[in-house]
Image (tube, rainbow, N blue to C red):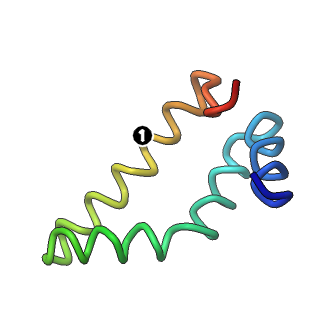
Amino acid sequence: MDIEEKRVIKLLKKAPAEGMAQIIDIHGKAVLSICRHILREESLAQDAAQETFIKLWRYVKEGNYGLK
């Protein structure tokens, strides 16, 4: 895990909405691109990308940060 990832995880813990905004800024285009590649339909790709971040938001709200 690099310094930027650690910084975002700390931000998620302190200010979840701000941390999620940072994650979407950093990874949003890549997630959408992968969804487009797999699904090959723009509306489905956008829905899948949104669901990806919604699922992550739920993990964050539950206090699950993927760290042990």
> Please, what is the three-letter code of the amino acid marked with disc 1?
Lys
- Front residue (pair 56, 37): 37
Residue 61 is situated, as x and y percent measured from the top left of the image, at 59, 28
Image quarter hosting the C terminus: top right
Residue located at (17% from left, 66% from top): 44
Residue located at (27% from left, 58% from top): 48
Residue 52 is situated, as x and y percent measured from the top left of the image, at 39, 50
Residue 50 is situated, as x and y percent measured from the top left of the image, at 37, 57
Give residue 39's quadrant in the image. bottom left
Would you place residue 15 above or below residue 21 in this image?
above
Graded by Cα atoms within 10 Å as few (under 14), some (14 to 19) or many (20 or more), the crowding at tag 1 reads few
Q: In the figure, is residue 59 to the left or right of 31?
A: right
- Front residue (pair 64, 14): 64
Q: How many numbered markers are drawn?
A: 1
Give residue 15's quadrant in the image. top right
User: For numbered disc 1, what is the local secondary structure?
Assistant: helix
Residue 21 is situated, as x and y percent measured from the top left of the image, at 64, 58
Would you place residue 30 above or below residue 55 in this image?
below
Q: In the figure, is residue 2 to the left or right of 20?
A: right
Residue located at (84% from left, 52% from top): 7
Residue located at (42% from left, 40% from top): 55
Label 1 sits on residue: 55
